[in-house]
Amino acid sequence: MRGKLLVIGFGPGSFEHMTNRAMDAIKESDYIIGYKTYVDLIKDLLTNQEIISTGMSEEVSRAQAAVRYAEEGKTVAVISSGDAGVYGMAGLVYEVLIEKGWKEATGVSVEVIPGISAINSCASLLGAPVMHDACTISLSDHLTPWDLIEKRLEAAALADFVVTLYNPKSGRRTRQIQEAQRILLKYRSPRTPVGLVKSAYRDRQHIEITDLEHMLDFDIGMLTTVVIGNSSTFLYDNKIITPRGYQRKYTLNTTEQRLRPHERLRHENEPWALHQGKNDSVTNVAVKEKKGLATESTISSLELAIEALSKVERNQTFESTPPAAVHHPVESIFEFAVSPGIANKKFTPSQLITLAEVVGEEGSMEYTPHHQIYVKVPTADPERVTQKLEDVGFILEPIGDVFQIKACDFCEGEKKDSIPHAEEIHQRLSGLDLPKELKLGFNGCGMACFGAVNEDIGIVFRKGKFDLFLGAKTVGRTAHAGQPVAEGIEPGEIVGLIEKIVLEYKEKGHPNERFFKYFKRVGKIQHYQYKDMTPKIEIEPAPCGD
Ligand code: SAH
């Protein structure tokens, strides 16, 4: 009978955080071998296993005993807290086996059972500090020369890793953590968030959130893990968050990503990435798409997170974006739409010159069907960009799922009676976050030559009063104009009415639900009843040629 070695990581300490396999493995063992404190942690799981618990520094004799019993044909559990392969017993067990010439095919069987390591359990209690490239460094110099540990600290600090320190301090080892702090402070702001987690998921769990400068003012011991953020880690409501980097691509209203999945990979959207040639990735992506091949993942974790959040609490909005806490300004993609005015469709030379200067070689401009130019510009200082453009009379608007007004040019301002109403609607509603993008078309006379009736909401000024159209389907084969719901609305009432309609949709529309779909679903907006405007499409049979 071949014996069996089960090298078990039992997680941070609570049974809920132990894997089923770890539990079963403990149950199927004849012997349990481990450090006393750890055996105590799992004692409620034990039935009649024989326990061999030893002191802390007796790992080698523990591993040797385990191998010996397994060679006698027994099933032996060697237990480590967290994961057995992270500063645990797994490596040592293999080393002892190798000393004895063990081979998998002929020797005792070995199974290493993974567990939740302190880097994961402690991070979960602090928020989400380990979202980006991270490393673990043990400050124990019993087995590792200090000058090597020092080098690793230096390299990790320089390379902006999130750093998790295991074995940070003990009764006798007190200087190591001071040295670690000194090295990290050479590269990182004293305000860098630091989390100290002691006894995660155990009875004496204690969490402290501090920063690099003050971390030594708190109790740090043998059971503490120290998590140190990178240069973009921030604090929010007593949670430590390391952003994945999405905050580098933001829009004027900053709460959501506007880039479609394939756009994210392009050089102009990710100027910090390593590209083959400047435009290679763009070409590759385009080619892949043409061939119907998958590009990168189609949905980002940010999108998933936002969706989850909207399900938990539909009415909550982010108060502000966290980048205020990011210490080093990073160049970000700032994207927005510019236009010369609501009614004014004419650019001045100085506007175009300024726009070109602001966009520079690295940015991009895209002319859209909505009388706007979409701008993307890498910058660490979005306010300076907006200021420059506003100084030459541009109107700047966020893009994405927001309210937008599209007005005609009022015959170059001749039909001026209605312009103030268009401007007031713009003032009150433009940029408002909505379940889906919503465009309001505003035409200054009954000609409606700018196609107001074909927008989500259409307003046509006619004989001093307004006609209102709701719920055009702007795209697709069954596209149709909006439903005429009212005519002769008094000028004093139109802005308030539009505001009510838009706010109703904002409040009651489902995420991603277009305005016409919302109208169809609820059947009534304000007191306007929905009528189906979908055209019946009859496709002629193809002529048969005889
Ligand atoms: N194998 C373990 C690590 C053992 S080294 C694992 O994967 O987690 C011992 C160090 O781990 C401690 O000094 C402490 O820094 C960390 N540690 C282990 N369990 C912990 C817990 N429950 N809470 C906080 N830190 C813990």
Image: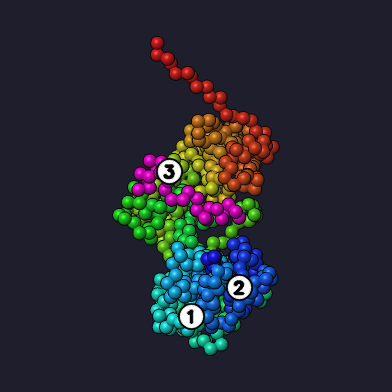
Label 3: which secondary element: loop
Among the two numbered marks 2 and 1 on one chain, the one whose residue lies closer to the N terminus: 2
Quadrant in which residue 114 is drawn:
bottom right
Work out whether 510 lies above or below 141: above
Segment tinted magenta in the rendering:
284-309
Relative horizontal placement of residue 135, taking residue 529 as reference (left or right): left
Distance CA(mark 1)–CA(mark 3): 57 Å
The residue depicted at 44 percent of the width and 18 percent of the height is: 542
Q: Residue furthest front?
A: 1
User: Would residue 333 be counted in the magenta stretch?
Assistant: no
Among the two numbered marks 2 and 3 on one chain, the one whose residue lies closer to the N terminus: 2
Q: Is mark 2 within 8 Å of ligand 1?
A: no
Residue marked by disc 3: 368
Taking the image as drawn, is residue 122 in sight? Answer: no
Q: Quadrant of the C terminus?
A: top left
Examine the residues drawn in magenta and state their main secondary structure: helix
Distance CA(mark 2)–CA(mark 1): 28 Å
Which numbered tag is attached to residue 139? 1
**Percent position of residue 434, x then y:** 58, 48
Label 1: which secondary element: loop
The residue depicted at 61 percent of the width and 61 percent of the height is: 20
Q: Which is closer to the viewer, label 2 or label 1? A: 2
Which numbered tag is attached to residue 205? none
The amino acid beneath tag 1 is: Leu
Residue marked by disc 2: 32
Pick the front one: 340 or 419: 340
